[in-house]
Every structure is written in structure tokens, then in C-alpha cells.
Image: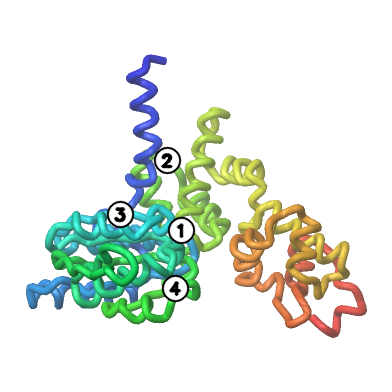
Amino acid sequence: MAKTDVAASQKGSRTLDQALRPENWAEYIGQSSIKENLRILLTAAKGRNHQPEHVLLYGPPGLGKTTLAHLMAKEIGASLRSTSGPAIERVGDLASILTNLSPGDILFIDEIHRLNRTIEEVLYPAMEAGVLDIVIGKGPSARTVQLELPPFTLISATTRISMLSAPLRSRFSGGTFRLQYYNDSEIAKILSRSAKILQISIDDESVYEIARRSRATPRTANYLLKRARDFAEVNDEPLNMKTVKKALALLEVDEGGLNQIDRDILTIIIDKFKGGPVGLKTIAASLSEEEDTIEEVHEPYLMQLGLIERTPRGRIVTKKGYEHVGAEVPKSQQNLL
């Protein structure tokens, strides 16, 4: 393959997820309450010729926080400058970003909970008074210089709002909004739109099959759709229900959307610890997996489906969890579940 072909292929791969991103409010499916609140906020600000107030979006990954930031910028015709918490390592990094903003810009900071406290404190006056406080010198001779910043709106996203300090959370005067998981119908609409953009021929029944295995998350749904398309193309098969099921089986995604590690968590608690209760550290050690991965990636969905419960003594598998992996509830546990 020629170098130009490789470059074009890499460029197409990088922009694929961006191509699936909604271009306007009508294309953004779900989160109706948040969309209406943001519409009112932006319309009112435009009507008064004011800069929209700062907004904080939080919730599990893959639900559309970044997409909402892009749509807000389009709604008011503003430029969107994007960065992330881990990318801002020093106070000087943030100062450089803020001083390079143009009037009316929107600054989007993803994973803002990963900012350190020193950098957070620089944000306080920038958000509240539109100024940047810079300390020049050290010790008794140190002095503070204030730089006036152009009017801007900060939109921040986080998956762990509890890690933000209370002073920072309180400065999002435009509102703090929690994105909810999607239902199967909403996911199916998103998949149908994605299939049209990707020029994938797929029937409604197959779309719904992918939707109900997508963990109620658009990003996961689009991932499964693309992998099912790849499977169909490589095996020269039509993308129908039979092919979708074979593709998802290869990915080890079952009918409830659980992957192999999800099922391993259930079976380990059942087989090794009689259904629990058992502590997170013990589960992690048994799986040779990080505690944070289990707690933040796998456990929320298992709890959402009602397959496990957290108790003061540890995690227990519910009756529904036993049924999901085809295990029989022990007689000693039947009265407890």
C-alpha cells in the first residue's frame, strides 16, 4: 500500500467516531431534560448578549458529555477549545490556555477531576471574575499580578464528580447535570443513525439485538455495530441477526451485555465464596485484576442489572445473578436472596 493510502486510511480511522457525533440538537438522542435545560441557558444568554455561564457534566463514560459540549459551541457559534485534566500538569499550562482564548470561546476540560488542587485554585478567579492571578517571585518579595481574561464559558466533564473540590463544583453557575443511561429504544435509534452514516445495511431486528447488549451506552453500541460490520465483511455474510449473534459471541458479549470478566466476577463469587459476601480486594486477587477496574468498569453494570449487591460485609450475588450464569442458588442462601 502506498504511503498516501496508508495516511488516508489512518485519517479515516481517526475521524470515524467524530463522523458519528451528532451535528445538531435534533440528532442528539436521549438526555431530554438536560438538552432542554441547556437550550434555555444558551437561548437566554444569546438574548441578553451575554456569555453563557459555566456548566459541569458528569456521569459514566460513553454517554455523550463531549458531544454536548460540541453542540453547545455550535448553538452559540463559538469556537471550542478542548483539553483534559491530565494534560494540564502545571499552573503555567492552564495560564497559557486561558490567555490564548478569544472572546466568546468555550473551553472544554474533560476528566476535570484529575486536575490537582493548585491548578484548581487558578481556575476560581478565572471562572468567577474573569481574571488570572499570577504570582511573580518567591518569598517576601513575591507579588500577584492580575491579567484580565476575555469572556469565556467553561464546560467540564467528569466521571467522578466526588473527586472535585466543593469550591470548584460551586462555581459552575450554569448548572451541574448528570447524564443518565439510555434505554434500548434510544440506543436502537442511535445505531440506526450510525448505520446510515457508515453505509451499513442492517435490519431493525439486528439493530435492536445490538442495542440490548450495549450496556445502555451509545459508545459501546457503536463499537459493537462496527465490530459486527467487520465480522460480516471478513466472512462475506449479510449483516443479519445470525451474523450479529456470531459476531457478539466472538466478542464474548452475552445477551445481557456482560463480557467474560463480568461473568467471571459472578462465577468466582458463587464458586469460591458461596455467593458472598466477599470483599473487593479478594475478588480482585482471585481475578488477577485491579480493584479500580472491577469497581469502576464492571461492578456498576452488574449492580444496574441487579446481579450483585454491595453490603457492609462485601459483595453478594443475587438470585438473578445465579440465574444469569446458570447456577443453582444454594438452599442456605435461598431465604437470604
Real-space CA distance between mark 3 and mark 2, rounded to the nearest whole angstrom:
34 Å
Picture residue at 46% right of the left edge, 69% below the top? 59
First-in-chain label (1 vs 3): 1
Please tell me which residue lies in front, 156 or 73. 156
Query: Element type at marker 3?
Result: strand
Picture residue at 14% right of the left edge, 63% below the top? 104
**Dot in front, 3 or 2:** 3
Query: Element type at marker 1?
Result: loop
**What kind of residue is marked 2?**
Ser
Real-space CA distance between mark 4 and mark 2, rounded to the nearest whole angstrom:
44 Å
Name the residue tied to disc 3.
Answer: 82
Relative image position of residue 263 (x, y in whole percent): 73, 58
Name the residue tied to disc 4.
Answer: 164
Q: Quadrant of the C terminus?
A: bottom right
Query: In the image, is residue 124 above or below residue 147?
Result: below
**Dot in front, 3 or 4:** 4
Real-space CA distance between mark 1 and mark 3, rounded to the nearest whole angstrom:
17 Å
